[in-house]
Image: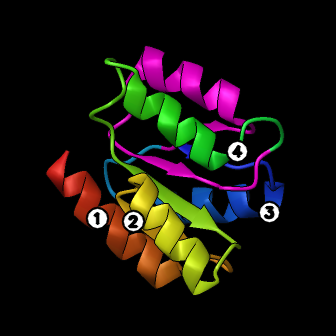
Amino acid sequence: MYVEDNPANLLLMRRIVDRLDGVSLRSATDAEQGLRIAVDEQPDLIIMDISLPGMDGFEALAWLKDNSKTAHLPVIALSANALPMQVARGNAAGFAAYLTKPIDILEVTSRLKVFLSEA
């Protein structure tokens, strides 16, 4: 699942996922919707933008980690917040990985393959 409010980034992720065999993409445009989907559908992996309307990616991650139904789900941050201290904050918060925008297609594809092979 990809939680992203920017339509262009969402479209790019759809194109990346469409190239992977046996993988489908569920999306949400805000954290609240993403949390509902996570509880109901238990995706193998969540990719979370940090700067979302309303609840941000850090708050959403904390909610997921505190909920017994979603605590086991790996969450990758994918954010334009790319300063070293922002990446360190993301890693300390418990994201499984912290990727930065603009989206690096090869890196995202590689990470997806790694995380989804472990699911």
Report how far apart the C-alphas of labels 3 and 2 lie in the structure: 22 Å
Q: Is residue 13 left or right of residue 7?
A: left
The residue tagged with tag 3: helix, strand or loop?
helix
- Label 4, on which residue? 56
Does the magenta segment cover residue 31? yes
Residue at image coords 33%, 46%: 74
Residue at image coords 75%, 55%: 51
- Label 3, on which residue? 8
Q: Is residue 112 visible?
A: yes
- Label 1, on which residue? 113
Name above or below for residue 44 compared with residue 47: above
Quadrant holding the C terminus: top left
Mark 1 vs mark 4, foreground winner is: 4
| Front residue of 80 and 2 | 80
The residue tagged with tag 4: helix, strand or loop?
loop
| Front residue of 109 and 15 | 109
Amino acid at circle 3 = Ala
Report how far apart the C-alphas of labels 2 and 1 lie in the structure: 13 Å
- Local crowd at mark 4 within 10 Å, few (<14), some, or many (≥20)? some
| Sequence-earlier tag: 3 or 2 | 3
Q: Which segment did they paint magenta?
A: 25-52
Name above or below for residue 4 compared with residue 73: below
Report how far apart the C-alphas of labels 3 and 4 lie in the structure: 19 Å
Q: Position of residue 61 (x, y in %)?
A: 50, 41
Amino acid at circle 1 = Lys
- Local crowd at mark 1 within 10 Å, few (<14), some, or many (≥20)? some
Report how far apart the C-alphas of labels 1 and 4 lie in the structure: 26 Å
Contact, mark 1 vs mark 4 (Cβ under 8 Å): no
